[in-house]
Image: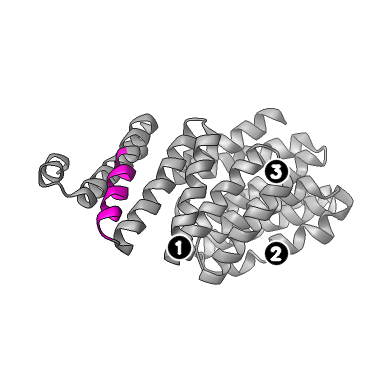
Amino acid sequence: LERDAERAGDRARLGVVLAALADVSRRSGDNEQAAARLQRAIGALGEALELRASSTVKAHLGQALLDWGKAAEALGRPAEAGARFRRAHQVFTELGSGIGAAECLDRLGRLAFLDADWVRAGELLGRALSQYEALGAERQLACRMRVARVALRTEPPPAWAERVWPIVERVQTQLSRLDHRGRVAATHGLRLVRHALDGDWLGWDAALAEAADHPPHAGTAAGAAWLGWLAGEAAALAGERARARVVLQTASGLFRAMGDRARVAEVDRFRAQV
């Protein structure tokens, strides 16, 4: 397909084919090859747009830039990733693609979080969350948890119940969409978060014992995984390291069962510091 597009001089088709091949590379873990293919794809798509304006081709360009940013981030090149996410955000905004623009803000917020720039991370993730909510996007669960994780680091523990809990409790709307088992497991995770924010460690212990009896299916574990991660971080930041490690290990296992290797790495990296 790549050779056919090259021979035909069809730059738009070549860009789409290269982006698809890059996606295969990225999913198989070869981010270097993915980045190289995406660079070529973006060049071809840019040339196609110079010849003829097309919203479809521009949408492919935006996605290719976003995917290049993801590959660069996975390779530990945050400056390169940030540049691609900002350019993708510009393209998606010009197209009026709310979901694409929101994902770019989300990704930029994550980079700011990793850089411990809490103010910038809170601003970017807050904007992403607002857009996800307006669109009813599935990604708002993960983004809301990231906003809460920022708040844990910018608010003193005595203020957590008042200032962090309102961010977290709105997740209940999304939990209602899970099956019964996933909903019950996530509800236990929500209780753990609440006890951590309140500093109620006896309540935490009781909630943890109950949660152990209601594990979720891998297919509906997202709520329990994210809430467990948040609860574990809150416990660790409150000085309850032993309690934190138990819950973080469970969250890591849930993300692993879901096949979310990136989240497993993040949780395990934090857990190693506890």
Q: Nearer the viewer, residue 60 or 230?
A: 60
Numbered range of the magenta stretch: 40-52
Dot 1: element: helix
Q: Amino acid at mark 2?
A: Glu
Give the colour scheme shown: one colour
Pointer 1: what residue? 94
Name which of mark 3 and mark 2 comes first in the sequence. Answer: 2
**Looking at the image, residue 78 lies above or below residue 211:** above
Q: Main secondary structure of the magenta part?
A: helix
Dot 3: element: helix
Dot 2: element: helix
Residue 18: % across, % down? 26, 42
**Looking at the image, residue 198 lies above or below residue 25:** below
Q: Nearer the viewer, mark 1 or mark 2?
A: 1
Pointer 3: what residue? 232
Pointer 2: what residue? 169
Q: Are marks 3 and 2 in contact (CB under 8 Å)?
A: no
Residue 4: % across, % down? 11, 44
Instruction: State how far apart marks 3 and 1 are (Cα).
Output: 40 Å
Q: Amino acid at mark 1?
A: Glu
Q: Are marks 3 and 1 in contact (CB under 8 Å)?
A: no
Q: Quadrant of residue 117?
A: top right
Q: Is residue 204 left or right of residue 32?
A: right
Residue visible at 41% across and 41% down? 68
Q: Is residue 115 left or right of residue 183?
A: right
What is the quadrant of the C terminus in the image? top right
Residue 258: % across, % down? 46, 46
Name which of mark 3 and mark 1 comes first in the sequence. Answer: 1
